[in-house]
Amino acid sequence: MAEKIIEKTIFELSRPGVGGANLPGLDVPEANTDSIPENMIRKGKIGLPELAEIDVMRHFVKLSTLNHHVEKGFYPLGSCTMKYNPKANENAASLNGFTDLHPLTFSGLSRGAIEIMAQLGEMLREIAGHEAITLQPSAGAHGEFAGLLIIRAYLESMGEPRKEVILPDSAHGTNPASIVFSGYKPVQIKSLDNGMVDIEALRGVLSKDTAALMLTNPNTLGIFEKEIKQIAAMVHEVGAQMYMDGANLNAMMGYVRPGELGFDVMHFNLHKTFSTPHGGGGPGSGPVSVKRHLEPFLPIPVVVRNNEGEPHFDWERPQSIGKVSGFYGNFLVMVKAWLYLRMLGLEGVREVSEWAVLNSNYLLSRVEDYYGLKFKTTPMHEFVADSTPLKEYGIRNIDVAKRLLDYGFHAPTMSFPLIVPEALMIEPTETESKATLDAFAEAMIAIAREAKETPDVLHEAPVNTPIGRLDEGKAARRRVLRWPIPEDL
Ligand SMILES: *Cc1c(COP(=O)(O)O)cnc(C)c1O
């Protein structure tokens, strides 16, 4: 274990006697410790690391460059939409008026915040083509869960909740998980050779037991479901609902409104499409928009406007599924999405999609002679390259991914969707320049050459990163998240 540690911790760097913290003197009466149990009173020093400010700065700046991030380099992690997040968003979200606002503040004193929630909801509804929305869920998966509970509540109000939710074999892993958590049975259907839903297979599983069809559009192969209107008609015919996983909205905002395609429910990923930094478990937000008939079931409270146009929280929703978040969701993420959308405007929103799709197709055109596409249909904002052609040299997708790190790029999403054997799912996003896309394409091409000529280089990669190739299974199962490192490791 020890040899894997490449940076000293701040505790090891500490030099007793240096000091570092300059705490103000006590300005309240000293506490009477008589009432505190003996074993809970600290006797010794608190053990803070002692370091000069400059050394602390250097330590953390250094750490910040060891990991890859979008401000350090290209981050084409498919399905995750790792776009650059304008710093203006962060400035707005760190205004004291927002950060110091207590969630229990009387709504008459937090009108600005509620107005932002109302406006964000209106803009998102416009993009979705839906009549109502909740901003409460805190992630995409959380939105899926809330959306499915809404469908369940609606169907229950019609007499019975039904049993199954259908999804394609290209679905994101959170989809079947949300289906199970909301009390349904996932029923999987195969994709066609062009990557789209097999309509005959769908017909075969649709029944009076079907509660919903859950689709991502464009799907996780980056392919737009062309027959979506026919699919929606078939689903509605058996009385089931259409759920859209909106994580891939970056491909079509301002062009296609899911509500008009026939989707009754959709979740957004504000932390993907609407520019909040994510990865590493940062705060997310997964609003859920719905058609009018599902509005009564939204989580409470719902932000609505009164006759004078003033927004307020509506708690009087007897058919609501209840709350899905302690308060109103991740408010500061909403502030970022609100500002992002206000800065873009309607034209800007369309341009995001245009550039996202153009960048992805440009990149594909540069690498497709070296990496196959299992599903040949022209993709939208991302594509799933398949490194199967390199298998004859003993090279797997993981070798390509690891070697890309040596070239200074984050790896694409690997081995997903599961229906592409050596999947490398690449999503460049709209915020990258042609120069960056070219540099990445050159690296992919160089790696294809290395596979043929010097395959061992790829097996050993990465060699230029702070840590070489890890035992990923062990790293995932035996994470060490505390200091000092436990003796028994
Ligand atoms: C990211 C993603 C999700 C889940 O979103 P989280 O915010 O990570 O929970 C669901 N579906 C698709 C297609 C995604 O890309």
Image (cartoon, rainbow, N blue to C red):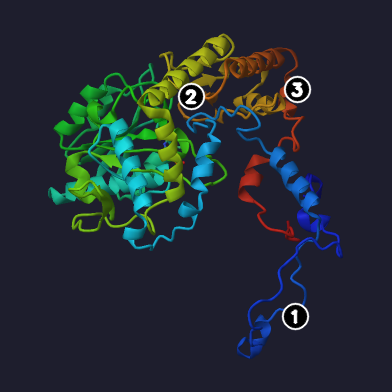
Residue positioned 29% across, 36% down in the render: 125
Q: What is the spatial separation of the Cα atoms under label 1 and label 2, in whole angstroms? A: 60 Å
Callout 3: SS: helix
Residue positioned 25% across, 49% down in the render: 310
Q: Which mark is residue 456?
A: 3
**Callout 3 crowding tier (Cα within 10 Å): few <14, some 14–19, many ≥20:** some
Q: Nearer the viewer, residue 148 or 343?
A: 343
Callout 2: SS: loop
Q: Which mark is residue 397?
A: none
Q: Nearer the viewer, residue 256 or 95?
A: 95
Q: Nearer the viewer, residue 337 or 168?
A: 337
Left or right of residue 222, residue 47 in this image: right
Q: What is the spatial separation of the Cα atoms under label 3 and label 1, in whole angstroms? A: 57 Å
Which residue is situated farthest in the top direction here? 369
Left or right of residue 255, residue 471 in this image: right
Residue carrying label 1: 43
